[in-house]
Image (cartoon, rainbow, N blue to C red):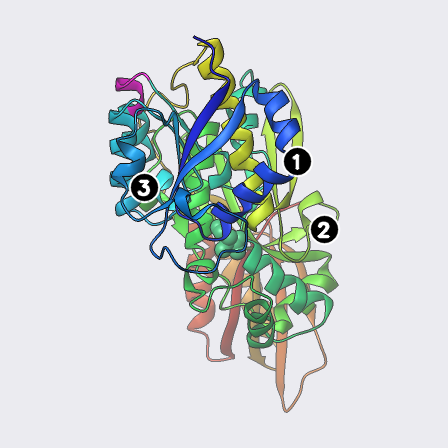
C-alpha cells in the first residue's frame, strides 16, 4: 500500500543531523514532490534531552533510548549520523533486522564494515544508502554505482579531504608555514582539535576504500591502502613545486592495472594544468576515468551540515520512492571478492627530490650516476645559488618502479657530498 508519509528515525543530532532537519524544513514541498510522500522525522536519538539545539524541534521527538526508533514498526527508515564504529554499527544491524532501510553518513563504518552490513541488508531484503559517507554534498556514490555503471573504471584520482586541501592551499597561495595554516584551519572549524586522522591521510584512505569498492567492484580492505599524510610538507616544497609547474595536493588514488589494484593516499605534485590542481581551500573533487565515458570530475564541498545533509536527504528521497514503488533494486555494489593489491614498491611513480649537497665539482655527476645505475631517468633539475658552500638541489624523475627510485636514493644518501635529504614526494606526470 502506498504511504502518504515515510517515517524516519534519526540516530544522532550533531552537525549532520541538524543539517538534515534544516533541509527537510527548508525544502519541505520539493522533497515531498520528489519523494512522492511526506518525509517525517518521528524520533531522534540524542544523548542529552535538554541541550539547546540549532533547529526547531518538538521535545517529544527526542529520546535517549535507541529502541524507541529501532523497534518502532511505524519507522520505515533509520538515518545514522552518530559516527564511529561501535554503537552506530549495532544500531544499523538492529535496524536491518527490524526490516528498516538505512541511510548513513558514516565513512569509517562503511569503509571498515560496509561489506558485512550490505550483506546483512541483502539478507533482510533491505538496503543501505551512504551517499553522505564520502565527499559530503558531492554526488559520488550514485555516479559510481549507477551513472557510470556501464564503464570499466580505469582510474580514480581525488582530493577527498578538505582540511589538508585547505592547509596546502594556504601554504601555496599565502606562503604560510604548515603550522600556521593548520592553526587557521582549526580556528575556522575545518580541522578537528585532534586533526591527526586528516593530516595523516587516514580520513582520505577510509573514503578511498568506499570509492574503490564501487569503482573496481570488489571488497577493499583498509589495511591494503598505502597511506602517507602531509605533515612532512614544507613551504619550500610548495614553492619549488610551483616553479616546476606543479601544485602539491593530498591525493587518493585508485587504479586497476594488469597486475592488480593500486590503492594509495599520499601528497603528490600534480601539473598545474590538471583540473585537480585548481581545487582550492576546503573543496573536494574526484576525477574519474572510465573506459567509455573518458574523463569526468565531481567537485564541491566535502563536509558541513547542509552539504552532507543534502546527500542524506537525497538518499531519503530515493528510499521513499523505492518503498512506495516497491522497486528496491537490491544490494548491487560489489560481488564482495577481494582483488589483489600491488605493493607500493612495485607501483610506478615519478618522484620529486629536494636535497642539500656540498657545492663542489662532481656532485651532479654523482647524482646522475646513482640514478643512471638504478635505471631512473631524470626529467628536471634545479639548483639555486649556494649559501655557505651548501647547494640546494631539486630534481624530478620520470616514472619508475618505486623500488628503483629507492635504490638510487640509498646510494645518494650514502654519498659524503650529500648532506641532507629534505623531501621526497611523488609526482603525477603530465
Ligand atoms: N575531516 C574531513 C575533511 C571531513 O576535512 O575533509 C569529514 O570526512
- Residue name at image x 71 percent, y 76 percent: 384
The answer to whether the residue labelled 3 contacts the one labelled 2, judged by CB atoms less than 8 Å apart, is no
Residue 245 to residue 89: above or below: below
Q: Residue 294 in the image: x percent, y percent?
A: 66, 25
Residues at discs 3 and 1 in contact (Cβ within 8 Å): no
Q: Is the magenta stretch mostly helix, strand or loop?
A: helix
Residue pictured at 45% horizontal, 53% vertical: 14
Provide the residue designation for mark 3.
Answer: 112
Residue 131 place in picture, x, y as percent: 50, 34
Residue 278, disc: 2
State the image quarter where residue 391 is shown.
bottom right
The location of residue 32, given as percent across then percent down, is 60, 24
- Residue sitting at x 53%, y 42%: 21
Mark 3 → mark 2, Cα distance in angstroms: 31 Å
Label 1 SS: strand
Mark nearer the N terminus (3 vs 1): 3
Residue under label 1: 297
Region rendered in magenta? 121-125
Where 389 sits versus 253, above or below? below
Q: Is residue 266 visible?
A: no
- Callout 3: SS: helix
From this viewpoint, is residue 260 visible?
Answer: yes
Front-lying residue, 397 or 3: 3
212 sits to left or right of 30: left
What whole-number distance in Å separates the C-alpha atoms at marks 3 and 1? 26 Å
Which of the two marks, 3 or 2, is nearer to us in this view?
3
Magenta stretch: includes residue 45? no
Amino acid at each position: 500500500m502506498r504511504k502518504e508519509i515515510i517515517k524516519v528515525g534519526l540516530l544522532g543530532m550533531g552537525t549532520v543531523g541538524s543539517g538534515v532537519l534544516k533541509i527537510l524544513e527548508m525544502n519541505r514541498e520539493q522533497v515531498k514532490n520528489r519523494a512522492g510522500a511526506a518525509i517525517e522525522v518521528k524520533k531522534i536519538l540524542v544523548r542529552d534531552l535538554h541541550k539547546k539545539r540549532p533547529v526547531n524541534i518538538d521535545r517529544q521527538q527526542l529520546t535517549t533510548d535507541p529502541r524507541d526508533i529501532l523497534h518502532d514498526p511505524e519507522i520505515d527508515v533509520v538515518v545514522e549520523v552518530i559516527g564511529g564504529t561501535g554503537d552506530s554499527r549495532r544500531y544499523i544491524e538492529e535496524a536491518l533486522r527490524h526490516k528498516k532501510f538505512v541511510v548513513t553518513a558514516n565513512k569509517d563504518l562503511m569503509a571498515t564494515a560496509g561489506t558485512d552490513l550490505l550483506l546483512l541488508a541483502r539478507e533482510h531484503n533491505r538496503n543501505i544508502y551512504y551517499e553522505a559517507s564520502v565527499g559530503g554534498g558531492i554526488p559520488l556514490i550514485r555516479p559510481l554505482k549507477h551513472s557510470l555503471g556501464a564503464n570499466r573504471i580505469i582510474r580514480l584520482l581525488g582530493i577527498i579531504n578538505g582540511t589538508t586541501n585547505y592547509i596546502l592551499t594556504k601554504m601555496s597561495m599565502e606562503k604560510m608555514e604548515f603550522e600556521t595554516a593548520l592553526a587557521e584551519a582549526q580556528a575556522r572549524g575545518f580541522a578537528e582539535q585532534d586533526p591527526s586522522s586528516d593530516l595523516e591521510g587516514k580520513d582520505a584512505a577510509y573514503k578511498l576504500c568506499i570509492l574503490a569498492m564501487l569503482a573496481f567492484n570488489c571488497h577493499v580492505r583498509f589495511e591494503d591502502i598505502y597511506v602517507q599524510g602531509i605533515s612532512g610538507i614544507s613551504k619550500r616544497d610548495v614553492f619549488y613545486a610551483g616553479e616546476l609547474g606543479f601544485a602539491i595536493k593530498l591525493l587518493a588514488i585508485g587504479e586497476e592495472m594488469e597486475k592488480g589494484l593500486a590503492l594509495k593516499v599520499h601528497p603528490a605534485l600534480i601539473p598545474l594544468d590538471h583540473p585537480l590542481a585548481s581545487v582550492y581551500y576546503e573543496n573536494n573533487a574526484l576525477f574519474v576515468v572510465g573506459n567509455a565515458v573518458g574523463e569526468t570530475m565531481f567537485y564541491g564541498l566535502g563536509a558541513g551540515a547542509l552539504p552532507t545533509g543534502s546527500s542524506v536527504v537525497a538518499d531519503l528521497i530515493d528510499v521513499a520512492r523505492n518503498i512506495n514503488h516497491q522497486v528496491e533494486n537490491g544490494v548491487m555494489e560489489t560481488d564482495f571478492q577481494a582483488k589483489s593489491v600491488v605493493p607500493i614498491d612495485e607501483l610506478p611513480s615519478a618522484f620529486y627530490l629536494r636535497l642539500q649537497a656540498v657545492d663542489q665539482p662532481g656532485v651532479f655527476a654523482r647524482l646522475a650516476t646513482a640514478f643512471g645505475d638504478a635505471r631512473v631517468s631524470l626529467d628536471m633539475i634545479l639548483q639555486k645559488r649556494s649559501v655557505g658552500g651548501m647547494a640546494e638541489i631539486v630534481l624530478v624523475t620520470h616514472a619508475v618502479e618505486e623500488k628503483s627510485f629507492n635504490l638510487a636514493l640509498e646510494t645518494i644518501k650514502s654519498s659524503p657530498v650529500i648532506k641532507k635529504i629534505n623531501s621526497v614526494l611523488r609526482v603525477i606526470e603530465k
